[in-house]
Image: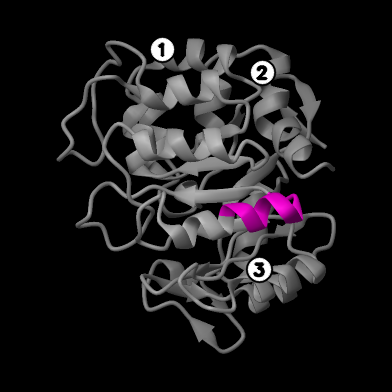
Amino acid sequence: MSSVAGSSFRVIDVHTHIGCYRDLVSGDPSWSRVTLEALVSYLDGCDGAGAVVLPVYSWNVDLMPTEYVLEACSRYPGRLIPFCVVDVREVCLEERVTRYVDMGARGFGEHTSKIPVDHECNLKLYRLCGRLGIPILIHVAHSRKSTYGMLDTPDLRGLEKVVREYSDVDFIMHGPGWWRCISEHFDPDVEYPEGPVDSPGRAVYLLENYGNVYGDLSAYSGFNALNRDLGFARRFLERLSRKLLYGTDLEGFFEPEKSHLALLKSLNLTDSTLENILHRNIERLLKA
């Protein structure tokens, strides 16, 4: 158990990765430091958090395959929760995802294939996740110039169509293309908009109106969405506390001053809001 705001709550980080395991080392010098042991040490410093560990593999980015994530998580049962991922353009998608779920994967993601949200390959994935009863965590790209990530219009119209049609699938949304939409108005050329949120945007609308849409607060995109307007952030977190998930993408590992946990603690949130965001929501999604 972990001490947060004076009470004991569990903490589960829904968005972590490893960048160095066995014979694989990330080509990114920063991520190459994230061994399994370094991840666990980082979690120890985040109030002893547990974590979802996400493989990173698609035709657009290749960091750590599902097989390695499953093996790494097996060394910390009950604390590390593996997801799985397959590029949706591969012909063996259904067979591999089903096998990974049988091996212990609890969800699909991080989904980074750089194709439109309503592409037929993605629709096949949504149908599969519905049949298997697993959530999907999606990185939304900032633009077509982004290296990886799901593509959609700036106002997420394609995503709305998808979450309405696939109401039996839980969508965990993440990334700059998603979190810039916390505000109604933004420059589509700016990846991380700054300044006060003048009025709630499409991300807020989707969270409010679709029971199967959730927000992953991780990475700089999630940190910035809250930190840019702390007054709005507190109201947003309280009102949608059952739709938001604590995650970091190890932002605080690389830049300790950008701690999602410290930011949440600073907002004087109610105990129930913190409990929902820090662990209850992901536990409900994973039927823990």
Vertical relation: 121 (above or below) 1: below
Name the dominant secondary structure of the magenta segment: helix
Q: Is 132 one of the magenta-colored residues?
A: yes
Q: Residue 160: name its quadrant.
A: top left
Residue 221 picture location, percent across and down: 37, 40
The answer to whether residue 34 is seen in the rendering is: yes
| Secondary structure found at label 2 | helix
Q: Residue furthest bottom?
A: 23
Residue 75 in view of the camera: no
User: Mark on residue 232?
Assistant: 1
Q: Nearer the viewer, residue 39 or 116?
A: 116
Amino acid type of the residue that numbered disc 1 sits on in the rendered structure: Phe
Q: Residue at x 49, y 53 (%)?
A: 253
Q: Quadrant of the C terminus?
A: top right
Instruction: Specify which label sits upstream in the sequence, 1 or 2.
Output: 1
Give whichever of 249, 140 is nearer the camera. Answer: 140
Tell me which numbered mark, 1 or 3, is placed earlier along the sequence. 3
Above or below, 240 relative to 87: above
- In the picture of the structure, the residue carrying the numbered disc 2 is 273
For badge 3, the amino acid type reads Glu
Q: Which residues are magenta?
A: 126-134
User: Looking at the image, is 23 positioned above or below residue 72?
Assistant: below
Point out which mark residue 37 bears. 3
Check disc 1 and report its element: helix, strand or loop: helix
